[in-house]
Amino acid sequence: MKYGICHLGVIPLRAEKSHKSELISQILYGETFKVIEERKDWLKVRIHWDGYEGWVVKRQVTLIEKETYTSINDKAFIPSPHLIDYLQTDKDQLFPIPLGSDLRGLSVLNHQRDEVASPNQKDREALIKTAFQYLNTPYLWGGKTPMGIDCSGLTQMVYKIHGIPLKRDAYLQAEQGNTLSFIEESEPGDLAFFDNQEGNIIHVGILLKHHYILHAHHEVRIDRIDQTGIYNVERQEHSHKLRLIKSIL
């Protein structure tokens, strides 16, 4: 089996081996994966962090040995803490990487960073501070960066930056953690999930203090939330129906 690492700031993960195929997620700088299929210029990969699978362009990643793959993932996750960070190559060139990129493979890729980063704290106050960095990010189906993100990409990245694994899709994230009976039991940083008329979970957001929620809907925004769901003050109506609340921390 082959293994790889993303050496660019962010690359698309597609449903099929075509540039016209649906963007299902993104792979950020330093994220590692296993190669499970290879077709000409395309690789089907399984991301180490969340097990998500999709197709990437072969030239946008670097193949590595199994020992290197293992050594990187055995270390505690070290995220890039800034909205946009800059690395230096061995040719003294600078290139940007987004918030939440994985810095554990810097030496493998022959890159340097002036500031020394360290794993983030796993506490609610720090998690909420990170979540606010994504505020006003435009909604992008499959997105995972401050330039464009979807609802489950937002929750996954905020938790990932603090070393807490979440699955990629909202309905899979809803299977993690402990279920709370009432919104009054929740604390900032807990996740709220919302379903459609068929009962399928289609949306997720991060709960804040005083019955507010931060979520990606058109853009990353803050709305009111009650036992019914998310209440949009501008439209004077509920935009999402609450299904359940989960405590992950």
Image (cartoon, rainbow, N blue to C red):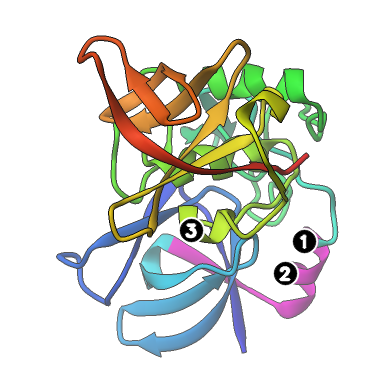
Q: Quadrant of residue 218?
A: top left
Q: Quadrant of residue 215?
A: top left
Range of magenta residues? 61-73
Nearer the camera: disc 2 or disc 1: 1
Nearer to me, 152 or 160: 152
Considering only vertical position in the picture, is 194 above or below 64?
Answer: above
Q: Are marks 2 and 3 in contact (CB under 8 Å)?
A: no
Considering only vertical position in the picture, is 132 above or below 190?
Answer: above
Q: Quadrant of residue 67?
A: bottom right
Question: Which residue occupies the extreme left position in the image?
Answer: 20
- Residue 43, percent across and down? 41, 78
- For the stretch drawn in magenta, the main secondary structure is helix
Q: Are marks 2 and 1 in contact (CB under 8 Å)?
A: yes
The residue wearing badge 3 is 171
Residue 93 visible in the picture: no
Q: Label 2 vs label 1: CA separation?
A: 6 Å
Tag 3 or tag 1, which sits nearer the N-term? 1
Q: Split into 4 quadrants, where in the image is the C terminus?
A: top right
Q: In the image, what residue occupies the spot 60% across and 19% down?
A: 208
Nearer the camera: disc 1 or disc 3: 3
SS assignment at label 3: helix
Tag 3 or tag 2, which sits nearer the N-term? 2
Mark linked to residue 69: 2
SS assignment at label 2: helix
Instruction: Identify which amino acid the numbered label 2 is placed on.
Output: Tyr
Instruction: Identify which amino acid the numbered label 3 is placed on.
Output: Tyr
